[in-house]
Image (cartoon, grey):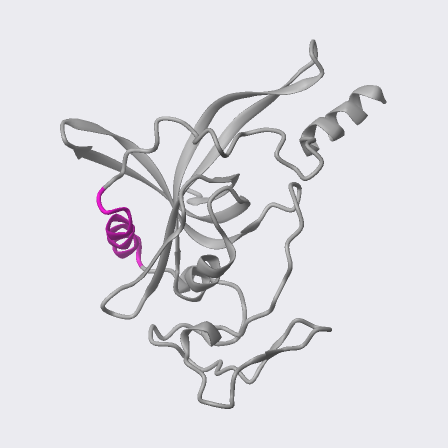
Amino acid sequence: MNDTITVCGIIATEPRHLVTDTGIAITSMRLASPSRRWDRSTSTWTNGATNWYTVTAFRSLAANVHKSLKKGDRVVVTGRVRIRTWERDGRGGTSVEIDAEGLGHDLAWGISNWIRVPRHANEHSAAPGTSPTIDPQTGEVHGADDGAGTDGALADGGPVQRDDLPEPAEAARHTEVALEGQFAPPAALPADLGTGADTADGADPDDVDAAGRAAA
């Protein structure tokens, strides 16, 4: 069975960052993915049910997510999916969790500035007079220690690989700690986040695309 999933959605909670006793960095958040359909009668997109996911990043990806993303951001995430059955305070249900392998801004909704950071450069304290500098032309970070971090992951600046993720059972335990046992998803998407026209010019990018196709 293919246990990899890719989801587009809105970060619905402030990402929570922590480091375990064994030195593994973790950042966890709730992701809301509203379903949408094109209404030909009104020539607009309408919102349907919202699917909820718990997204957890580990190690250097967790550190980068913590510094880059916030509640309300539109993102795309791909990673290993897991279904959890939970019971708490007389309630029960299932939750869908994603151990992120890739996570970043959804550029259909805005602009993001890229800064390349060597793996684990953000997990080391620079000595006096050796602070990292950023090349304005390439975005590369110079002078940062890109050696192995406390969790022993690779330091090659490449993307997270499946082998970099904790084993599923271990990842599930870390996610449980990050959630503090609160597995039930929010009842609804917070009103301040919205689901539609939240681009800079007030237009949903899907409206523009769909309208263009309809006109053609």
Q: Is residue 42 above or below residue 142?
A: above
Residue at position x 40%, y 38% in the image: 53
Tally of numbered discs? 0
Please state, as top left, top right, bottom left or bottom right, where the N terminus lies in the image: top left
Magenta stretch prevailing secondary structure: helix
- Is residue 170 rendered magenta in the image? yes
- Is residue 49 rendered magenta in the image? no
With 89 as the anchor, is 96 left or right in this view? Answer: right
Q: Position of residue 112 (x, y in %)?
A: 64, 54
Residue in front for this viewpoint, 75 or 70: 70
> In terms of image quadrants, where is residue 47?
top right
Q: Is residue 153 above or below residue 181?
A: below
Q: Is residue 147 above or below residue 162?
A: below
With 100 as the anchor, is 25 left or right in this view? Answer: left
Q: Residue furthest top?
A: 41
Residue at position x 41%, y 81% in the image: 125
Span shown in magenta? 167-181
Q: Residue furthest left?
A: 90
Residue at position x 57%, y 24% in the image: 36
Residue in front for this viewpoint, 21 or 158: 21
Q: Position of residue 63 (x, y in %)?
A: 43, 64
Residue at position x 28%, y 51% in the image: 178
